[in-house]
Every structure is written in C-alpha cells, then in structure tokens.
Image (cartoon, rainbow, N blue to C red):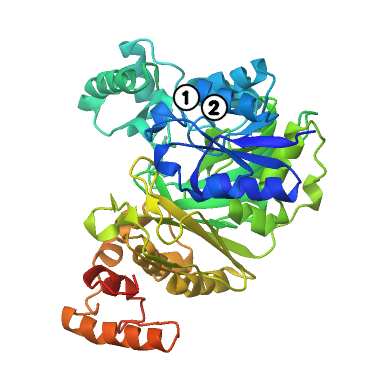
Amino acid sequence: MIKKVLIANRGEIALRVMRSCREMGITSVAVFSESDRRSMHVRYADEAYFIGPSPSAESYLVIDKIIDAAKQSGADAIHPGYGFLSENAEFADRCKKEGIIFIGPSSYAIKTMGDKITARKTMVDAGVPVVPGSEMITDEKDAIKKIKEIGLPVMVKATAGGGGKGMRLVTKEKDIVSSLRAAQSEARAAFGNDAIYIEKYIKSPHHIEFQILGDTHGNVIHLFERECSVQRRHQKVVEETPSPLMTPEVRKEMGDFAVAAAKAVNYSGAGTIEFIVDEKLNYYFLEMNTRLQVEHPITERVVGVDLVKQQINIANGLELELKQDELRQYGHAIECRIYAEDPENNFMPSPGVIRHITEPLGLGVRHDGYVYEGFEIPIYYDPLISKLIVWAGTREEAIARMKRALYAYKITGVKTSIPFLNRIMETADFVKGKYNTNFIEKNSEFLMFPDKHEVKVEDVAIIAAYVDYLDRLNLQADVHSKNGQNSWKNCGRRLSFNRF
Ligand code: MV4
C-alpha cells in the first residue's frame, strides 16, 4: 500500500492532493522551484525538495528532477495533479520503469487519448458518437472531397492539439486549401506533428463533460456531468453540476457512452470525457482528459466522493467500492475560478504580493486556494489564485450562495477576476441557465463595461476614513458601492492604507 506520495505540482492542486493524503495517513512530499520557496504547498507537506529555477521547463516539467526527488524521499508513488506532467505518457512510463506508482492511467491510455485522431477512431470503434468528420488527412484532393461531403462550415484540427490549440474554422469554399495548409504548418510548428483531421463545425455548442473512474479490474463508473460552457479563450471560468441543459434520459445515455469510452482504453484512474452538445441535445465525443481536472470539486460535492482518495485507492490496485446504481447527484454545485488577472485590461495576468486576503466561509462554501498575506504570486505559472466552490439544494440557491461568497471574498495587492465573476452571476442568461460556449462573447457588453456607479475617486477618501475607523474598533470593514458590489478592491488599489 502507498505510504508516501510525491506531489509533482504546486499551488492549490498540490495542497488539494496533500489534504487527502493526510486523511489517508499518507506522507506528502512537495517539490518546489525557486519562486515557490515560500509557497503554501511546501509548508503543508511533510517534506519538500528543491527542483530548480522558476520556469517550469527547468523544474516542474523535468522528469529526471521529479524522479530524483521521489527516489531521495523514498516516495512510493507520484501524483501529477493537473497540467505539467499529468498527461505525459513518457513520464508515466518512466515512473513504472523506476518502480514508482504513477497515480493516473496507463501510458497507453494517455497516448491513445492524447492523439485526437487515434482517440476519434477508438471512439468510433467503441460505438461512441463523434462529430461527423474525417480520419487523418493525407491528400489535399481527398480532403476537399470529404469537406464537400460533410458540408461547410468545418473545423480543421491538429491531432496533437486539444483544448483549443491548433484549430481552424473554414466557412468558405475558396478558403479550404489555404486553411488546410495553414493548419498543417501551424501544427508542425506548435507540436512537431503535422497530422490534421476535419470535423463538421458545431456552432455555439455546450461543453459538457462526464467524470469517470476506472479501476485495474476493469470496472468503470461515471460520476455524472459538469457543465463547462462559461469559457473565455478556451479557459474555463465557471463550472456547474448538474448541467441546466441536461435531461435524465440524455444524462443516462451520455453517462453510458462515457463509460464505454473509458473502457475502450482499459482506463484506470480518474478521467473526463468531454462532449460538445448542440441546442437539440445532440452530443458528440470531443476529447478525453486523462487527469484529475481543475473543476473536480463540484462533482465531489454533488456526488459525495473524494476523487483523490479514489485515485489513490485505484493506484493501490483496489477494486472500486462505488457502484453506478448507488450514485446520485445531490443538490447543485458551482465553481468560480479566481484568477490574478485584470478583467478591465483584457484579462492581463496581475501577479504581485497579496496584501490582504479574507476568504469566504460559511454553509456550503469550499475554498481551494494557496495564497496568504505577504505571498508573491509568481509570474511563471498559471495565475489561478483559488477556486471558490459552493453547494446548495437548488441551482437558484447555489447562485445566491456564490454571490454571497464572492461578496465576502476580499483580496488586495493583485487584481482579480472576482468582480467579473460577480457580474456573471447576475447575467440573465446565466441566471436562467440558458447559455452555451458563446456566453461571454454574447454578454460582453454587460460583463465587460465597468459599473457606472462605481466608487468615484472623491468617495475613496471617505471610504478610507470609514475603513480606518472600523479597523480601530477592530471591526470587519465592509464597504459597498451603490449597486451593492464589493468595492474594497478600489480602495486597496487607489490608496495605500497603513494596515496593508
Ligand atoms: C469544436 C467546436 C465546434 N465544432 N469542434 C474548442 C476546444 C477544443 N477542445 C475543441 N473546441 C471546439 N471544437 C467542432 N467540430 C467548437 C469548439 C469550441 C469549444 C469547445 C468546447 C468549449 C469551448 C469552446 C469554445 C470555442 C470553440
């Protein structure tokens, strides 16, 4: 049985994994780069190993360094988290070769699903619906013929792509040849692999994904769906479960297909089957993510399962104890991703020192973060500060709870996406549950234009005095602008308080 796990990651996900390890009586080993010396995951871990300079290509992505740290520490397993080496087949192989358990699927499953053309073919063979399209394009004339069969518009995609990289939309016949060539050379430059394929373009789809778990005995279950359509430039912003679009019948069908998809690659561990879904609830397999995902907590809350604990049990060779027909979705969960970025300045990353943080608390709130006052968010990594997850009995209550939690969440020192998330919670299409991947673009007017009632500069002095007054009384300062939005951020930005 696994006694010591090295977590080959940083930030909130490293902490998330370590918490489950601690509950299971497993020792945690952290690794850290130069700019993560003072990171919370290093403090939380039982041991920590320095693995080099800040750029991830020189630290978190270097297989040899991670393996060395695992050996030095005597860890018997490695959890890769998400990103970094989590979907690297070579790394999974190397762990195996070194006699270290990789907490994740086989390198075969990673490889098969990582190559989108092979993944598509595997799904077709397994009877899972895919978007009408082609296999690998080898000949321009065949490609043109195929595109005319499918009908414009189509998407040209790179087999090594995924997550929005290496895609091209073709709407006009005259653009076909140039698009094929451009996609191919882009793919070659970006991935060193110029294989491309074609799919019919599904306009403004929903992105709905199913969480699955497979064990090493051939059992696979799904833990229902997550609606991930609130995205900006292929970056998820808000996720929720259940999906407002879903019906019990379609949920059952898609869940069964998700299980079939995982079985087709003998999947073991936690994974996600992504579908795109159109307004008529036609659904198509898009890709599989062979890792634990950022948004896994909403599934954990609604289904009542610790996914990291499941991953570790599976890695130990245990049989899944969860049974499909015993699983239910209880209530509704929403996750907001809190980024250190500036929504008013084209979402530019906003790294810097956290001057103040008040985390939201209370009934039905989970906050997975890693920053603390005085911590400097490094420029080298994803600017995710934390994930705010709420749960309530109904969707309506969950939205109200998210607004309450966002309102209580105060960060100064860096700009954050909190005000933007607040506006999403108040957008009519979101409140009604009527949105697809077009949501942010469609509602950009409402979402992007700063509130006209925002605190004026001359008001700031008054607010500052008030904050200071409350502070002296040792009370929590809570100052609102006229529309009820939290405007502490403005105070922190425009004035420097002694207390900060
Ligand atoms: C598509 C599509 C429409 N039709 N494929 C974007 C990310 C990558 N995983 C695949 N993506 C898409 N593939 C066909 N045939 C639209 C998208 C897409 C999208 C998909 C999921 C979530 C958000 C998206 C935003 C824009 C485009």
Q: What numbered label is drawn on residue 62? A: 1
Using residue 186 as the reference point, say whether residue 272 is left or right of it.
right
Image quarter of the N terminus: top right
- Percent coordinates x, y for residue 219 in the rendering: 78, 34
Residue 192 appears in the picture as rendered: yes
Q: Mark 1 near mark 2, Cβ–Cβ under 8 Å?
A: yes
| Secondary element at tag 1 | loop
Task: Please identify the residue farthest to the top as the structure is shown.
Answer: 139
Q: Residue at x 35, y 10 (%)?
A: 139
Q: Amino acid at mark 2?
A: Ile
Pick the residue in front: 31 or 216.
Answer: 31
Quadrant of the rendered image containing residue 57: top left
Dividing the image into four quarters, tell me where ligand 1 lies. top left
Using residue 47 as the reference point, say whether residue 139 is left or right of it.
left
Q: Amino acid at mark 1?
A: Val
Quadrant of the rendered image containing residue 263: top right
Q: Residue at x 76, y 52 (%)?
A: 327
Pick the residue in front: 115 or 291.
Answer: 291
Q: What numbered label is drawn on residue 66? A: 2
Q: Say few, some or many: other residues with alpha carbon within 10 Å of mark 1 (under 14 / 14 to 19 / 20 or more).
A: some
Residue 220 appears in the picture as rendered: no
